[in-house]
Image (spheres, grey):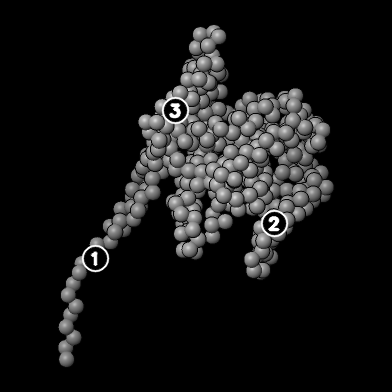
Amino acid sequence: MQNEPKVFFKKESARFIGIGLVIFLIVQFLINTNLLNSFWSGIIFWGAAITILALGLNLIYGFNGQFSLGQYGFYAIGAYTAADITYRWTHGDPSGVAVVLSGALLTLVCYVGIAAFLRRFYRVTVMTQFTFYLLGTVFSFAIAVLVLAQPLGRLAQTILSALPGGLSQQIVFFIALLGGAALAGIVSYLFGIPVLELGSDYFGISTLGFTIIVKVLLDNTDTILPFPEMKGARGMIGIPQWTTWPWVFFSLLLVVMVMRNILHSSIGRAIVSVREDERAAELVGINVANAKLLAFVVGSIFAGLAGGIRAHDLAFLHPQSFNFIQSFNPLIIVVFGGLGSMTGTLFTGFVWIILLEGILRDLPTGYETWRFVIYPLVLLVMMLLRPEGLMGRYELPYLRRVLPARRKTEETEPEEVPA
């Protein structure tokens, strides 16, 4: 009996990965044979990116219960960070690779040290924690920029230049995606420490404000911020178009597997318990603040990864693409698919982009903007007829948590002890 769940997991995992690989090969064949033109392949890439983004929001809102409108802010951070790294690299400047990697690693080490130090004190206030972590972050990136950027940049350029051109390009792209996701996670950690203390509605408003702040900063990257290559409100050009179907597919698969394993762990049960009853979770010993912060950071890392993928597909970034109105797109996908359903988000993310940016764009000339009337009506009907979302909380067998089988014990009469 104890072996049955293990067999089930192996079978369902193999089936899920097998079906995924079949889909991957079919799409790759269609792209290689030009049966899928650049427009529709771009729609699929966009669908995968926004699905990764929406999965992160579903972890924050659907599974953890924290209403957030800040995903597009972290999406923008990941997009611009990854784009800046590859832009600098293609223009002979390896400092972006060195700064992001060394800065992120130093920040992680610094965070571990700060956490160990603060645990020595009782009831440290939130603002004290925020101050320590903020100073640690500034210190780490200052060291990365002022001390490590030049030597590590030259070392990275020497090593990667010795490799074949295609391989070095893929390594730089991997570092760029990793750097964008890492920076989004660091910013979300700093932002989440004080803001997650707020209630759900106030937290949603604060995350919306964060998205507006990010958009304004992106408008002024060439004035307020020292990034003239981003060109501020004019939009960033010259980004290498390195996003391919293998990168898109395996990034999405990785996000699905990581999120599924988190939710099936004791940490995932703690995250979900906060959504169900925050007070009860606290009474049984769950650190509610840590559960909220973990869900928020992981969801933001997913958003940063999605931004890097999208940036290198478009090869152009403009701050207007990340305004607060756009923040409602992943929220609509999550609600439409079903709060707390990974399957619903996976399905709805692709359908949303294919319908809105693909099929409905083929309306007769002059009627293209009617798609912005059609999809709200569909959403309204959906909420009236099925408020729990398209999938409710249904999950594919691989994504569904399977409880271990109950052990059957034979009840026997106790033996009589001889006198």
Task: Name the image quarter holding the C terminus.
Answer: bottom left
Q: Note whether 239 is above or below 154 in the view shown.
A: above
* Upstream in sequence: badge 3 or badge 1: 3
Q: Amino acid at mark 3?
A: Leu
Q: Name the disc covering residue 127, or none.
A: 2
On the image, numbered disc 1 is attached to which residue? 409
On the image, numbered disc 3 is attached to which residue? 380
Residue at the image point whose x is 58% and y is 42% from the top: 204
| Residue 228 in view of the camera | yes
Residue 352 in percent (x, y) is at 49, 27
Given contact means CB atoms under 8 Å apart, are the residues at marks 3 and 1 in contact?
no
Q: Note whether 316 is above or below 70 in the view shown.
A: above
Residue 283 in percent (x, y) is at 48, 63
Residue at the image point whose x is 29% and y is 59% from the top: 406
Q: Amino acid at mark 1?
A: Thr
Q: Quadrant of residue 178?
A: top right
- How far is disc 3 from disc 1 in space, using C-alphas? 52 Å
Judged from the image, the secondary structure of the residue bearing numbered disc 2 is helix
Task: Name the image quarter holding the N terminus.
Answer: bottom left
Mark 3 packing: few (<14 Cα in 10 Å), some, or many (20+)?
some
Judged from the image, the secondary structure of the residue bearing numbered disc 3 is helix
Left or right of residue 100: residue 57:
left
> Closest to the observer: 415 or 160?
415
Mark 2 packing: few (<14 Cα in 10 Å), some, or many (20+)?
few
Q: Amino acid at mark 2?
A: Met
Residue at the image point whose x is 75% and y is 24% from the top: 234
Left or right of residue 400: residue 27:
right
| Residue 173 in view of the camera | no
> Closest to the observer: 237 or 364?
364
* Upstream in sequence: badge 3 or badge 2: 2
> Closest to the observer: 6 or 104?
104
Residue 160 in percent (x, y) is at 71, 38
